[in-house]
Image (tube, helix red, strand yellow):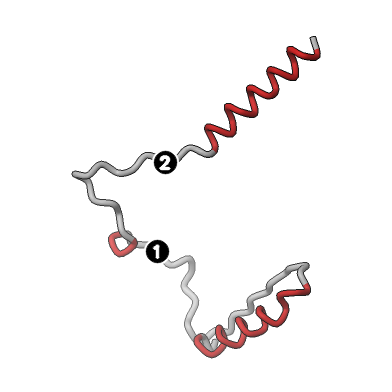
Amino acid sequence: MKKFLSLLMVMALAVSMLAGCSSAPEAPADQPAETPSETTEEPMDDTSSDEMVEVDIFQFKVEIVEALEKAVELYEAENPT
């Protein structure tokens, strides 16, 4: 009975691995792939560009503090508000 259950579990894992690792079907050649320029997106809300925005980043890795501080400096240089 244990061998049967373990074999059943191994088969289920193998099937799920094959299903999860399979590639998505590609678009047919006669239909062009949709590009981001073709899509229109609605803004999430009507905030003015003069309004201050605060972004909080919560992370546990001490190793990337310097990289995050540099990213903050670059972001603030590009986005003053």
Residue projecting furthest to the top: 1
Q: Quadrant of residue 57?
A: bottom right
Q: Nearer the viewer, residue 77 or 80?
A: 77
Mark number for residue 24?
Answer: 2
Residue in the picture at 70% in, 22% down: 9
23 w.r.t. 6: above or below: below
Residue 74's disc is none
Q: Position of residue 10 (x, y in %)?
A: 68, 24
Question: Is disc 1 surrounded by few (<14), some (14 to 19) or many (20+) residues within 10 Å?
Answer: few
* CA distance for labels 2 and 1: 28 Å
Q: Image quadrant for the C terminus?
A: bottom right
Looking at the rendered structure, the secondary structure element under dot 1 is loop
Residue shown at 55%/83% (left/top)? 75
Of 38 and 19, the residue lying toward us: 19
Q: Secondary structure at mark 2?
A: loop
Residue type for callout 1: Glu
Q: Which residue is mark 1?
A: 42
Quarter holding the N terminus?
top right
Corner quadrant of residue 70? bottom right
**Residue type of the residue flagged with mark 2:** Ala
